[in-house]
Amino acid sequence: MAMRAKSTHAPNRLVDRLVHHGEIDSFRELCERVLTPSTRYLVLDLDRTIHLGRDLGQDLGWELCAYEGYGQERFEEIEDRQESGRFLLDLDHPGKTARYLARSVKIWAWPGAYYGFWGKAAARLDWLRRRGFRHFIADPVRAAQRVPQMTLLRHLESTPHPVLRRLAQHVWERHQPDQVIDREDLAWVRTRWPQVEVVLSSASPMPTVEVAGEALGVDHIHYSTLERINSGEAKIERLRELCPDVGHPDVEVVGISDTSRGEDHCWAQYFTRVVDINSPTPFPAIVSSDSPLLEVHSATLLTKRERARRAAGDTQYLDPRREKLALPQVKRELRREDLERRVGWVLRRVNALGSLPGQHAGDIAYRLAVLQEASTSFVRA
């Protein structure tokens, strides 16, 4: 594997290569473009990566609310009515439905409002986002996620694990049409690159990640607990604990994530190649100078349902949810010289501030985050 010499000058640099692949037929085709005979680990995110636009851990929380609200017997009679929404309404039993909705509101009203303000609103309102950086001493969107994440984990603690496993299995089966990666894909990867170990690393709770890991046939699973939320830098720490050779100069690691809300952007500081799929917040082209990252890739990966629609001749086969993603549909490759022409000015400003987001707090972290996002916008344009 080609290794990059550490810079003794600027603290940050541009990656060597950035590729927008546009629409790709299958995960296997993507792997052929990013995996190599030197790849040792393939790290996959779960929510919104394995499935288009689905948060399976969050869905498990809503499933549990319905299970508790209706009671086991009635829930088992109506659970097949559940489709893709969060609420399962049983209009034949208004009393039980009212109890279910009241319980859901009691558990989720405050966490939902908190994340709605510091997460969703702060992501859209620049003045609130700047204030959030000061308040949390971190990116407010990702910091605000802690409240609903901890609420979910505490809620799951009250239910026996076998029940949670069954509910998680139901959620997994319900969303199969939205899958973009499946067990057969990963079996093919092992046939093509037998040295690769597949890691499923998610912020979702154990039952969700266990069910997903077994269904996909991965080698390792990493999930959140009350003691540790498995997101951001915590994913890297967990990966190093269970796979000690990660971080060695000769070990090539490829990470694939939708990196929703920028949660997995830190992968760019540790992995050899990173790939964002179906992502509104792609990986940045600017990394620290001692990062091993060589390439950033971005792709639109079709779901099972979309591939089936296209095969049936439907010209409108793309899921309507993709309209919010604004993903490039045409392949484009940019080398470091091209990136320098487009976003070299951003790199110089970032270097003037000293280092990347995550290493500063308050206004400086806010300014660095805005600069990184500006570089992404110019690259995608």
Image (tube, rainbow, N blue to C red):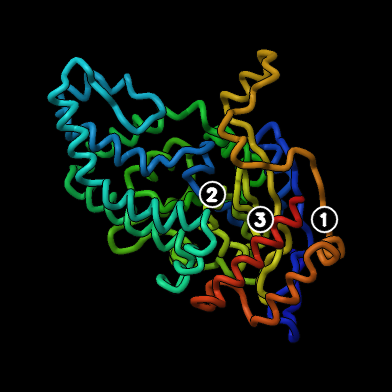
Q: Can you tell which of label 3 and label 2 is closer to the viewer?
A: 2
Give me the residue at 19% from left, 32% from top. 100
Label 1 element class = strand
| Mark toward the start of the polypeptide (2 vs 1) | 2
Q: Quadrant of the N terminus?
A: bottom right
Q: CA distance from mark 2 to mark 1?
A: 24 Å
Residue at the spot of label 1: 334
Q: CA distance from mark 3 to mark 1?
A: 22 Å
Q: Nearer the viewer, residue 290 or 309?
A: 309
x, y percent for residue 33: 74, 45
Residue at the spot of label 2: 44
Q: Can you tell which of label 3 and label 1 is closer to the viewer?
A: 1
Give me the residue at 48% from left, 66% from top. 139
Label 2 element class = strand
x, y percent for residue 233: 48, 66
Label 3 element class = strand
| Mark toward the start of the polypeptide (3 vs 1) | 3
| Mark toward the start of the polypeptide (3 vs 2) | 3
Q: Is 273 placed above or below 176 here?
A: below
Q: Is 328 placed above or below 179 here?
A: below
Residue at the spot of label 3: 39
